[in-house]
Image: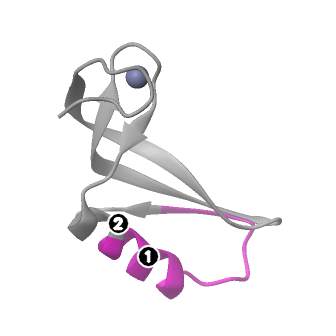
């Protein structure tokens, strides 16, 4: 798979990523499998990963400003 920004090879890695749900709410998802560009740090999520991320973000309790969730949980 190639980066859509710079054309370099994407690496499949597992990392923690922050998602901004609203202006006041950030959810950090840990151990997320993504494809990241080794050159420009642009990244891609597989469709099934994105679907799971969306489900996680929807399920998160909105009371706290910062939530940390494990992807594999
Ligand atoms: Zn790139």
- Image x and y of residue 44, in percent: 35, 45
Magenta highlight range: 51-68
Q: The N terminus appears in which quarter of the rendering? A: top left
Q: Is residue 73 visible?
A: no
Residue 31: mark: none
Number of numbered discs overlaid on the protein picture: 2
Instruction: Label 2, secondary structure: give it.
Output: helix
Residue at (33, 31) in percent of width and height: 36
Instruction: Label 1, secondary structure: give it.
Output: helix
Mark 1 lies on residue: 54
Is residue 34 or residue 40 the one in the foreground?
A: 40
Residue at (45, 24) in percent of width and height: 41
In this rendering, would 21 be left or right of 47?
A: right
The CA span between labels 2 and 1 is 6 Å
Is residue 65 or residue 40 the one in the foreground?
A: 40
Mark 2 lies on residue: 50
Residue 21 is covered by the magenta coloring: no
Q: Quadrant of residue 70?
A: bottom left
Residue 59 is covered by the magenta coloring: yes
């Amino acid at each position: 798979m190639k980066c859509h920004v710079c054309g370099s090879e994407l690496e499949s890695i597992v990392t923690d990523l922050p998602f901004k749900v609203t202006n006041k709410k950030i959810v950090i998802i840990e151990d997320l499998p993504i494809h990241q560009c080794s050159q420009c740090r642009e990244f891609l999520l597989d469709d099934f990963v994105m679907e799971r991320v969306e489900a996680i973000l929807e399920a998160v309790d909105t009371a706290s400003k910062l939530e940390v969730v494990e992807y594999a949980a």
